[in-house]
Image: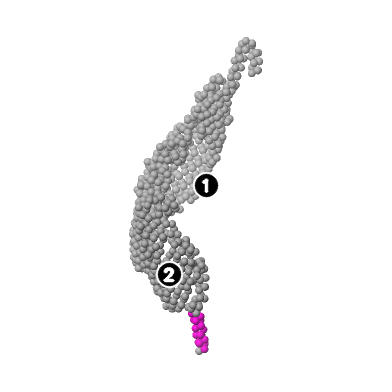
Amino acid sequence: MKFLAWFFGVVAVLVGAVYTLLFTSLGNGLVKPLIETEIQKQIHLPSRLERFSLGLSDIDILLELNPNNTVAIKGKYSLFAQSFDINYAVKLKELATLDALTKKKLNDSFFTDGNVKGDMKHLFVKGESDVAKSNTSYSIELQDFNPISIIANVSDLDLASLLHMLGEKKYADAAVDLKVNFKNITPHQLDGDILLLTKKGELNRTVMKKDFGITVPKTLFKMNLDAKLKGDDVDYRYILDSNLAKITSSGNVKPESLAVDLKYGVHVAELAVLKPVTNADLRGALKLSGTLKGTKESMMLLGKSDIAASNTTFGVNLKEFAPKSAQFTIKHLKLQKLLYMINQPHYADALLDIDGDIKNADVKNLDGSVKTTITKGLLDSRYLTKAYKFKSPMPRTTFSLQADTKLNKNLIDTKLDLLSTLANLHNKKIRFNMKDASLESDYKVSIKDLNRLYFATERHLKGGFSANGNIKKAKDLDFTMHSDIAQGKVDAKLHNDDFHADINALQTLDILDMLIYPKIFKSKIDATLEYNLASSQGNFKGFLSEGSFTRNQVLDLTKQYAHIDLYKQRFKGNVGADIKKENIVASLDLKSNTSSITTKNTYLNTKTKRIKSVIDINANGNPLVVKLSGNVERPKVQVDASKILKKEATKAVTKELEKHLGKDVGNLLKGLF
């Protein structure tokens, strides 16, 4: 008995101690600083308990998170029954000072108050709030702390105030009404409905212009979402209507299995206004409509659009919401409208047709084909002339294109034929490797009339040109070219910036004719050219053979003074040039059996077409110096014939003296001269 008395005595003392510690003013005073310290650690704010009263059945607590932000609870509870009836009041007058707790910069204030009633198994929460200037009431039922029903009514919530409170820009003004009536939100037993109305909406044009550089007209909008939940199904109807865009969607969704059967429609009057959402620099109008049906494992997205005035249809098969396969057809898309839509300059007008069949849309295992056709193409010559600062107007240029593309895993192979009034380009296979971003292609280019390129070359050219070769761009750029031109051949290669060309048996008359230079020299030329594109410097070394001159002023003067016809002679020799951008310093060393023509420092500027040259001619022992200057097409010619004249004068005087004084006098005069 003594033991029992002692035991119950100890228990009574412990109960008394706990009671004193927890449920008396003395105990509350002891516990209060400990709780304050723990709260401060958890929320990182200088919080303090203004009131802390915890009795056996009453609770009254006022927590000051920081100045002007408080949370209060007051009511009854039963420790043994684990039930309570508690009122709460949350008064956050300065949300901006709570960023340590909210982890986001908030503004303005937030107030809510209400009542929590029930026990640990079954709770009822009922309250009111004026969030974002609204009139809000809510009622939540929880079982084992999991919500099983929610009823909420939000009237006239101010969207601009809500955005400001959440730290966002005031992108729009609107009044929002929300009615939520979830009688049961237990999975597979859903029963309820949602009605969301947005009215008196207007985009903030000033913010749109400042933040996104978008100028939009006055834009009013309204929104309606009506959803009904029953069992596993959600039937809904959604409309967003404005003078810029209208978006509609309706159908059935099963959230648990992610099964959908819905229709959608998008009509955008101005795409630019969607930039804050899409982050795409688009503009113009767009219509899009279609259906989405299936489950997460297999879903089919069908649609049609009038993008860029086209007739476009598509079908995409989705697996786990990722594209598995796709088919699409684009008919008569207007290229000029597409360029406008993607905010690009008006480079051209054209009609674009595309047919695509992508059997496997996995980027690593692509399988499919795409056929692209461009017809009725017309370049905007006026814009291109201005944009690329051509000194002469670009001619009217029409074009068409045909491209067939095959997709095979990471390889994209394209056969391309581009026809235009400037040039034609044919590629049997353009191969792009997506894995290493490398490109390989053959090519054949032909130009019927080189003179049509005057706007780019800034010089008149005559005749046509064709070439073929290969291009490879990986770590390095490699380019090869072969051309049968001027009755000879040119083989060239480019490695990054280094260009090398081998010239074999070209006829100089054909070259001069192409360049529209005076055709003064007929010859065959073999040469090499080394040139660096980055520095615009290089050198040219060539050999002229089987050369003969056509009628020209220089040799006419030579014939006049030296009494020798160089037109009948055949020349051969070296020709060279050092190139520094538009400046060329050339040399020439031609010889025949009896004569020679040389120049060492002929200066030519390809941009100004100015020439400065001193040519030394030795015509069968008769020296003649010719100076060329001015425009290369019509140079000024100066002839120094003093040595020939001196020689001719000596012959004449000697001949006359010999007649009168004898041959010995003639020999003496020759020695003097």
**Residue most extreme to the bottom:** 1
Q: Residue at x 53, y 43 (%)?
A: 496
Q: Nearer the viewer, residue 414 or 534?
A: 534
Q: Position of residue 124 (x, y in %)?
A: 39, 71
> Which amino acid does the dot numbered 1 rest on?
Lys
Q: Position of residue 607 (x, y in %)?
A: 51, 34
Q: Residue at x 36, y 54 (%)?
A: 220
Magenta extent: 2-19
Please say whether residue 6 is one of the residues in the magenta stretch: yes
**Disc 2 packing (10 Å; few <14; some 14–19; many ≥20):** some
> Which amino acid does the dot numbered 2 rest on?
Ala
**Residue most extreme to the top:** 660
Q: Position of residue 59 (x, y in %)?
A: 45, 75
Tag on residue 475? 1
Dominant secondary structure of the magenta stretch?
helix
Q: Which residue is mark 2?
A: 89
Residue 234, above or below 369: below
The quarter in which the C terminus is drawn is top right
Tag on residue 402? none
Q: Nearer the viewer, residue 197 or 343?
A: 197
Give the SS element for disc 2: strand
* Disc number lying in front (1 or 2): 2
